[in-house]
Amino acid sequence: MPLPSAPTAASGRRTYQVRTFGCQMNVHDSERMAGLLEDAGYVPAGERDEVADIVVFNTCAVRENADNRLYGNLGQLAPKKAARPGMQIAVGGCLAQKDRDTITRRAPWVDVVFGTHNVGSLPVLLERARIEREAQVEIAESLEAFPSTLPTRRDSAYAAWVAISVGCNNTCTFCIVPALRGKEKDRRPGDILAEVEALVAEGVIEITLLGQNVNAYGSDIGDRQAFSQLLRACGSIDGLERVRFTSPHPRDFTDDVIEAMATTPNVMPQLHMPLQSGSSRLLRAMRRSYRQERYLGIIENVRRAIPDAAITTDIIVGFPGETEEDFQETLHVVREARFAQAFTFQYSKRPGTPAAEMPGQIPKAVVQERYERLVALQEEISWAENKRQVGRTVEVLVAEGEGRKDDATRRLSGRAPDNRLVHFARPDEPVRPGDLVTVEISYAAPHHLLAEGAPLAVRRSRAGDAWERRQEAPADSRGGVLLGLPKVGVPAPLPEPTGGCGVAHS
């Protein structure tokens, strides 16, 4: 039922906007926030709207400038809110969980502050704030119910997130996320597979299994092989063509997971596995429960079982105490592993983490110089690895929003099975997002591939049909909100990866 507020949209309903920062878990939570707001009667703000009636910030606490970024955005909205009666601002996510009392003190014009465990309370808190005319702060300390039962608005008709766990049991010294998201809680396998089957029935052909430490799945239910069994179970779902997962932890990367990846046809030849540092000494200081030899051993085993796998990673430069020798160890691993891509981050001190109090904080100039050397090396390797793809034939899942220059170049864009971005010439026949196009790679750049020749084949898919049905629907009914089992999706493009917790850009 719509909330009793002054209508401002052309449809006669109030508008909303969700601004997301951080990892894929936050992106997925934002889908739930959007679904809840639409279920409560709000509609998405249009591109021409200067500001929405409801603005929700879904925050990240990993990066050092996260606080400044939030308060800068809130400051910009203060005069707009003052000039717009009835406008409301809500702040959720990890930073809200961490700074619950600080937010309303520094930004008293904020109406609602809610935590990572009580996303479902958002509409009620907004209505309570409107009626009582004072800020509502509600922070649950632990998860009461798995949030996948919430209504969810997904932007993609063809690809979807499926959360299999929340929280994390690791104690990495640089990461504050476990303190904010809590201990790991696993969903029942039957519930996960039921959600996947429901998504496939709606036209989704690609799913990404999502968790803060995705391959630790099963630790909460006492089954160390639960994740590999889940991958194999996904392989038996008719109509599900692509399965991905992010992000695994090397500690939990067992041989049965590699075997499941190699032998389950719809599990894609792609792996994102955070390294963080190549120095075993620093890995110990980070409380990362593996060492360089173990990490490279996993890479070797994956390449042996899946020769064409594209492997990506996260790396932190300038962790406290990092010496030039430690940094050289990281460069060594990068050369040995030959990552298709690496998301590299300069160490960011976060209050409340053990690393923030460690001696040996590295000067900014030193960190910057090392960072530039690492980026240069990885760019060289990424380009060389992409050049190896030239001449190969790949089937590309056509995507929306992946190619910013597609209209100017008369190309389409999408992802190969190994998740490499491919731009290709438009076929003569109509092609929709969700369809699959077979092309031959003719050119490689460090961050994308190009297929300049005519496509070899076009395969229209159920996902393309679903996309087409959505376009034909009335504008205010698009977005796919479903009550009970959620509709979840991969937005494109993803937000900037954070590098602190296990969930990173895939």
Image (cartoon, rainbow, N blue to C red):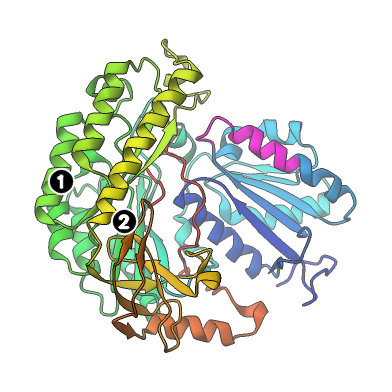
**Closest to the observer: 317 or 44?**
317
- Front position in the image: 376 or 93: 376
Residue at 45% in and 52% down: 24
Image location (x, y in percent) of residue 472: 58, 87
Residue occupying image coordinates x 56% and y 47%: 21
**Residue identifier under label 1:** 254
Number of the label disc, if any, that sits on residue 206? none
Residue 322 x, y percent position in the rendering: 35, 18
Residue 449 vs 399, above or below: the answer is above
Main secondary structure along the magenta-highlighted residues: helix
Q: Amino acid at mark 2?
A: Phe
Q: Which residues are magenta?
A: 61-74
* Quarter the N terminus occupies: bottom right
69 inside magenta stretch: yes
The residue positioned 38% from the left and 36% from the top of the image is: 375
Specify whether residue 160 is in view: yes
Helix, strand or loop under label 1: loop
If you read the primary sequence from the N terminus, does the residue marked by circle 1 or circle 2 appear first? 2
Q: Count neighbours of disc 2 (C-alpha within 10 A) and say few if under 14, some if 14 to 19, many if 20 or more.
A: many
Type of the residue with mark 1: Thr
Residue on which the image places disc 2: 245
Q: For marks 1 and 2, give the CA distance.
A: 15 Å
Q: Is residue 173 above or below residue 475?
A: above
